[in-house]
């Protein structure tokens, strides 16, 4: 990756600055809720791609612009959300966790109870429906934790589409339950052996394949990033989370929450929760990034750490972890879904405007939060979501008891069995695996 000032190989375009000099929060919020699809969020976003990808992205843009306001499309999507995904997902009052922490009231948005076990199905279903409308017969996807790959394979089976999923070799080993499920659904799972063999390399491989297969193939990008229109389209499909939370919390509490907390990898579950509330000046937003093993380069995936850097990679401009030469830095997280060097452009803009507070949560804290929620509430969260729980554990004790916090539990933890069992029950887990090999 190169800094924007040095990149001459990408398709360039005018970037609308749009930075507000006003300090009033509501004035800044007004700039973040435009009436038309934003190609940029302040200086971030855009479409920086090889020329050969431009026609496919323009076709996607025009298709989405048409169908996002089409009553028949929206009616079919809403029906599928209800009958196929199991929406609305519950908003659960975590009484035991609330009492344990002794601070504000904590609610959990249980996206792990959606079909396939995570929020990823919201976006995958919307994009698959759009792909069918556009006449595509194949879909491709990238995945880190496997949940987006699983969701893409699922909707491909539902709509009769051929599916290829690109996944880093490292992630395939640590997320094998999802690899098995994707194959069971009929998808071809392609191991990526370049670079760090994780999510960023899977994204690169998917883009390369798409360039060679544009005519009949749609790329179901899994997070609210990449070249326009993906950041907007993915956000809009995921905003069902925040819309449901608004309705549910008003039914249960008679008012809106004071605090919203979500983990942040690329950012689809967090922007899906946050976006429907961005015009509410009294709500505070918190993003939990992967602090990994610690602050040293290569040991974490915290883009908003001590020295956040702006650059262009994988078709969009945002904050990326970079080395001194402007190349993408290696990352680490116990959670495969947060092990990514970039972040969605809308979240980058929200960070600049001081509307979202980002914090790094270490692997150790995430694992402690994983155990805490499991043992207190009987809810086993995905390791990604455990980062959000850990941030809530840090925040809640110092907040007033009548404040309301909503934490997005973006997925359930059965996919992480190969990681959590090794970390939390290592001796017995290794003994079990050895016995399975012996009886194989």
Image (tube, rainbow, N blue to C red):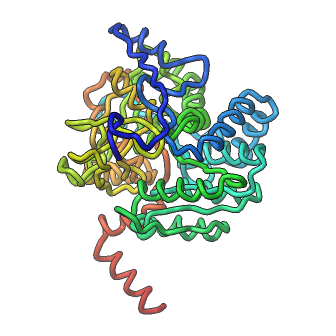
Residue at left offset 40%, top offset 65%: 194
User: Is residue 425 visible to the viewer in this orientation of the structure?
Assistant: yes
Nearer to the camera, 238 or 244: 238
Name the spot of residue 37 as percent of width and height, x first.
59, 25
Give the number of marks.
Answer: 0
**Up-down relation of residue 27 to residue 332 (above or below):** above
Residue at left offset 52%, top offset 45%: 50
Nearer to the camera, 182 or 262: 182
Residue at left offset 53%, top offset 64%: 178
Nearer to the camera, 141 or 438: 141
User: Is residue 100 visible to the viewer in this orientation of the structure?
Assistant: no
Residue at left offset 55%, top offset 45%: 119
Q: Is residue 272 left or right of residue 433?
A: right
Name the spot of residue 382 as percent of width and height, x first.
44, 53
Residue at the far right: name it. 72
Q: Is residue 345 left or right of residue 363?
A: right
Residue at the far front: name it. 8
Name the spot of residue 14 as percent of width and height, x first.
47, 25
**Up-down relation of residue 410 to residue 346 (above or below):** below
Residue at the far left: name it. 296
Nearer to the camera, 204 or 372: 204
Name the spot of residue 320 as percent of width and height, x first.
33, 41
């Amino acid at each position: 990756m190169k800094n924007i000032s040095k990149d001459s190989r990408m398709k360039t375009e005018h970037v609308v600055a749009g930075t507000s000099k006003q300090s009033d929060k509501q004035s800044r919020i007004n700039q973040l809720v435009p009436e038309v699809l934003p190609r940029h969020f302040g200086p971030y976003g855009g479409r920086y791609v090889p020329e050969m990808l431009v026609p496919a992205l323009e076709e996607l843009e025009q298709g989405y612009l048409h169908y996002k306001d089409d009553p028949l499309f929206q009616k079919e999507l809403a029906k599928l959300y209800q009958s196929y995904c199991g929406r609305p997902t519950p908003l659960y009052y975590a009484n035991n966790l609330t009492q344990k922490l002794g601070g504000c009231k904590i609610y959990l948005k249980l996206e792990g109870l959606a079909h396939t076990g995570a929020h990823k199905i919201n976006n995958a279903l919307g994009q698959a429906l759009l792909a069918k409308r556009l006449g595509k017969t194949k879909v491709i996807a990238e995945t880190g934790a496997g949940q987006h790959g699983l969701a893409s394979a699922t909707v491909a089976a539902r709509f009769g589409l051929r599916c290829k999923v690109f996944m880093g070799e490292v992630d395939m080993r640590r997320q094998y339950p999802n690899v098995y499920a994707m194959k069971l659904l009929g998808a071809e799972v392609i191991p990526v052996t370049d670079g760090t063999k994780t999510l960023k390399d899977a994204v690169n491989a998917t883009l390369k394949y798409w360039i060679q297969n544009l005519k009949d193939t749609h790329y179901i990008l899994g997070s609210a990033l990449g070249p326009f229109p993906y950041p907007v389209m993915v956000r809009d499909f995921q905003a069902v989370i925040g819309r449901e939370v608004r309705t549910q919390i008003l039914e249960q509490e008679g008012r809106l929450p004071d605090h919203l907390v979500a983990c942040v990898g690329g950012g689809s579950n967090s922007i899906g929760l946050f976006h429907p509330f961005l015009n509410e000046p009294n709500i505070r937003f918190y993003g939990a990034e992967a602090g990994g093993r610690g602050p040293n380069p290569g040991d974490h995936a915290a883009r908003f750490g001590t020295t956040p850097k702006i650059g262009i990679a994988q078709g969009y401009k945002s904050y990326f972890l970079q080395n001194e030469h402007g190349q993408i830095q290696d990352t680490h997280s116990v959670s495969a879904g947060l092990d990514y060097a970039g972040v969605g452009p809308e979240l980058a803009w929200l960070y600049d405007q001081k509307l979202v507070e980002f914090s790094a949560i270490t692997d150790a804290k995430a694992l402690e939060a994983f155990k805490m929620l499991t043992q207190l509430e009987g809810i086993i969260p995905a390791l990604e979501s455990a980062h959000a729980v850990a941030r809530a554990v840090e925040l809640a004790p110092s907040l007033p008891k009548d404040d309301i916090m909503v934490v997005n539990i973006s997925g359930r933890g059965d996919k992480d069995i190969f990681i959590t069992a090794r970390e939390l029950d290592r001796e017995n887990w290794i003994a079990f695996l050895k016995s399975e090999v012996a009886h194989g």
